[in-house]
Structures are given as C-alpha cells and as structure tokens.
Amino acid sequence: MTTAIVTGAARGIGAATAKRLATDGHPVAVIDLDEVAASLTAEEIVAHGGRATAIAADVADADSVRAAVDRVAAELGPPGILVNNAGVLRDNLLFKMSETDWDTVINVHLRGAFLMTRAAQAHMVSASWGRIVNLSSTSALGNRGQANYAAAKAGIQGFTKTLAVELGRYGITANAIAPGFIQTDMTKATAERLGVSFEALVDAQVSQIPVSRAGVPDDIAAAVSYFCRKEAGFVSGQVLYVAGGPKS
Ligand code: NAP
C-alpha cells in the first residue's frame, strides 16, 4: 500500500484522517508543528497494528517541507497520498484584522498546501499514481470575521482544480473537502473568541444543520478515505461539501 502524508495530524480532523488511512492499510506520516503531539497519533496507529511515523514540520516553511517529505520517502516509502489539512484561525472583523493575522492564515493554508504538494507530487509523478486531498471549508462561501480564512479556503478550491488539470495525465487526482461545523479544538477556540460556551455554540450550529447534529472528525476522514481509493480515479477537481446539508 502506498504511503500517505497527513499534515496537521496531531489532533482533530488530521488525527482522525491519519488513523482512517492507516486502517485502510496505508503507512502514514503524521506531520505537525509539535512532534510530541504528532507522536501520540502515530503511537495510536502503531498500537492498532498500523505503520506510522511522526515528523515535526512547519508546512509554511520550504526547507522544513523538503526535509519532511524526504524523510517520509526514506522511512515509509515514496508518498502516493497527500492530505493538506494543517490549519490555523486568526479571526477578526476586517477593520480590526492585522497584516500578521492575514499573512499567517494565508501562509499556513495556501503556501503550506502549495509547498507540500510541490514536494510530494514528484514522487507521485514517478509512480504514475497519486491522490491529493485538500481541506477547504464552507467558510470559502463567506463568513463574518474570517476574511483571511475565507480567502485561503476559496484559494484552496482553485488550487485543487488546477492540480487536477495539471497532474491528471500522471494518474494523480486532486480533490477538496469543504467541512461545515466539526467539533474540534479549532471550533472550541471559536467559542472562546465569541465569548460563549462550546455547548452553546454547538447548539446554535446544530439548529442550522439539516441532519440535526454537529460533524465529527471521522465524518471528514471517511470522505478523505473515499477520494484516496483506487476506484475513485475518475473523480478529480471536485469540491465535496461535508456539512450535514447543502450548506452549513
Ligand atoms: P485543529 O484541531 O486546530 O488542528 C489543526 C492542526 O494543524 C493542529 O495540530 C496544528 O498544530 C496544526 N498546524 C497548524 N499550523 C501548522 C503548520 N504551519 N504546520 C504544520 N501543522 C500545523 O483543526 P481542525 O478543526 O482539525 O481542522 C483541520 C482542517 O480542517 C483545517 O485546515 C481547517 O481549516 C479545516 N476545517 C475545519 C473545520 C472545523 O469545523 N473544525 C471546518 C472547516 C474546515 P498546533 O496545534 O501546534 O497549532
């Protein structure tokens, strides 16, 4: 089975995705800023009989990305699957948004996905096979207080479609998943910023979600797993909204 890389896999959606791809039989590189936290995900995978290695890397830093992808190829084998999941929030209304908050979000999501994909695609092209899955968001459609994040997540969609066009001839597909409200540390931080309890935020969100529940990381991991399958090879350049309804 081909090696998978999941970025931002120490927790949340990334951790669930890493575990799901390991269950599907892939050796998994668990990449995150914090190696100790990434190790917890990798150890869990190994404890369940899978193969995984934890690697500390900042996806927004070109040298760090090059070194990480080289290490993945050396320790687990050439990567054939890449899930660009690492993300941060720096929410604020536009008139209060600092340049640093703008740059941080654009760098981690967009520059990070660009650098990771550029490094990983070389291995996929050599193998004439690859699967790239990028995490967008329903915020790409516009969300108050998230001008930076919405721009990055809309950018991810254009990036994904271009990867599909350029890399399709090498047996590589590229798709994006746009989650709605998923219960993770990221949405807990949103509750804190809004000055409401997490339970109150979940209740408010659920009242707007057609399936009447909040999303969990495994909901997204299942969609990633589908795009990474061999039989999904004719599905490329798509954006799948996983939001419990047509929009969040
Ligand atoms: P999360 O719980 O905050 O986890 C994100 C992970 O990414 C963290 O472990 C974080 O590490 C890591 N990370 C941040 N910057 C990084 C960098 N420069 N290099 C490497 N790793 C980095 O977030 P999540 O909720 O699971 O979200 C995962 C993805 O789904 C993100 O792209 C997010 O935008 C997207 N998404 C989430 C939701 C939702 O409702 N949760 C909805 C739509 C889209 P640290 O902890 O050290 O910062």
Image (cartoon, grey):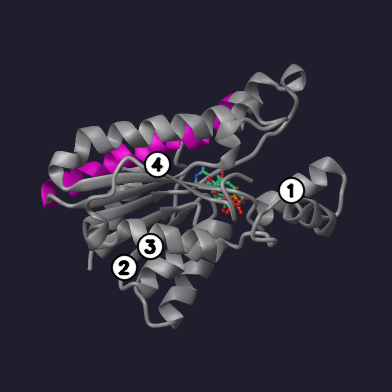
Which is more toward the observer, 184 or 212? 212
Amino acid type shown at disc 1: Ala
Above or below residue 114? Residue 124 is below
Which residue is depicted at the point 38% across and 62% down?
225
Amino acid type shown at disc 3: Ser
Which residue is depicted at the point 72% across and 30% down?
144
Element type where label 2 sits in the image: loop
Dot 1 or dot 3: first in sequence order is 1
Element type where label 1 sits in the image: helix
Dot 4 or dot 1: first in sequence order is 4
Residue bearing mark 3: 225
Q: Are marks 4 and 3 in contact (CB under 8 Å)?
A: no
Residue bearing mark 1: 189
Which residue is depicted at the point 30% across and 55% down?
81
Instruction: Report the magenta stretch's main SS.
Output: helix
Element type where label 3 sits in the image: helix
Tell me the crowding category of disc 2: few under 14, some 14 to 19, or many 20 or more residues within 10 angstroms, Cα based.
Answer: many
- Can residue 113 be found in the magenta stretch? yes
Report the Cα–Cα distance between label 4 and label 2. Answer: 21 Å
Q: Is residue 15 left or right of residue 53?
A: right
Report the Cα–Cα distance between label 1 and label 3. Answer: 27 Å
Residue 107 showing in the rendered view: no
* Circle on res. 27: 2
